[in-house]
Amino acid sequence: MRLHALPESKLRGEGMTSQRARDRLATRLKDEGIGDLRVLEVIRRLPRHLFIDEALASRAYENTALPIGHGQTISQPWVVARMTEALIENGLPERVLEVGTGSGYQAAVLASLGVQVHTVERIEELLRQARRRFRQLGLEVRSRHDDGNLGWSDEAPFDAIILTAAGEGIARQLSEQLKPGGVLVAPVGPSGQQVLWRLRKNEDESLDTEQLGEVSFVPLLGGLA
Ligand code: SAM
């Protein structure tokens, strides 16, 4: 990870945002079943406190979702880790589409793993802040202000697709933008009854589906904000 354009002290953090706090979070995620060492190492290194408002920075390394404004949240670290593991389990994908940039943290985790990330966000102000963070951290992430239900057809197909907001199902346009052999991970269902799904596209374009457990996400909405 190339880091620049930020004062060293801000990047390093102190007290509740220090490296020790990050180490403790990674240890906790490992204790709670995250087994992929590449994911744990990225979470240990990535300054999550820079992805949230300074007023909440002291809570950045708690294993919890936090508000990022506009009624949205930065996902719980365990969920980010689990979804990332589920996406890269059978090998690191080259090009990934993320729907729901939010704070930019999930995209930054993937980019730090060496994946080429394309991310789409419908709330322009959140996208503007996330882009600033990518620049500050020297992460190359391609991003677009759009309705992620449409995917990113000009850049398709992708080796993997990740949705970080829950829809009622998975839009056909998205599964069509997945390469044969590719994996899509998404929460699906209404509030209180959401399940994390993993879809694998076979060479004949059929889809195998698998449930990975219960989750809680903000809803996938339509249109732009
Ligand atoms: N990946 C984010 C992170 O690491 O902070 C999680 C953000 S939050 C749980 C989900 C995001 O999805 C919100 O920022 C929300 O605005 C966005 N979203 C919801 N519906 C969307 C859509 N149709 N297209 C693009 N983004 C959408």
Image: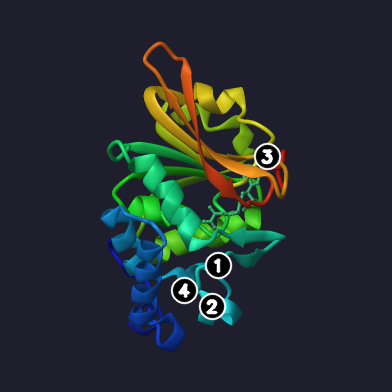
The N terminus lies in which quarter of the figure? bottom left
Q: Are marks 2 and 1 in contact (CB under 8 Å)?
A: yes
The Cα atoms of the two marked residues, 4 and 3, are separated by 28 Å
Q: Tag on residue 59?
A: 2
Q: Amino acid at mark 1?
A: Thr
Residue 99 seen in render: no
The Cα atoms of the two marked residues, 2 and 1, are separated by 8 Å
- N-terminal of the pair, mark 4 or mark 3, is 4
Label 2 vs label 1, nearer the camera: 1
Q: Check disc 4 and report the residue beneath it.
A: 61
Q: Check disc 3 and report the residue beneath it.
A: 189
> Which percent across, then down, holds residue 141?
41, 49
Label 3 vs label 2, nearer the camera: 3
Q: Check disc 1 and report the residue beneath it.
A: 64
Residue 211 seen in render: yes
Q: Are marks 3 and 2 in contact (CB under 8 Å)?
A: no
Q: Amino acid at mark 4?
A: Tyr
- N-terminal of the pair, mark 3 or mark 2, is 2
Please tell me which residue lies in front, 94 or 122: 94
Question: In the rendered view, would you say 165 is above or below 78?
Answer: above
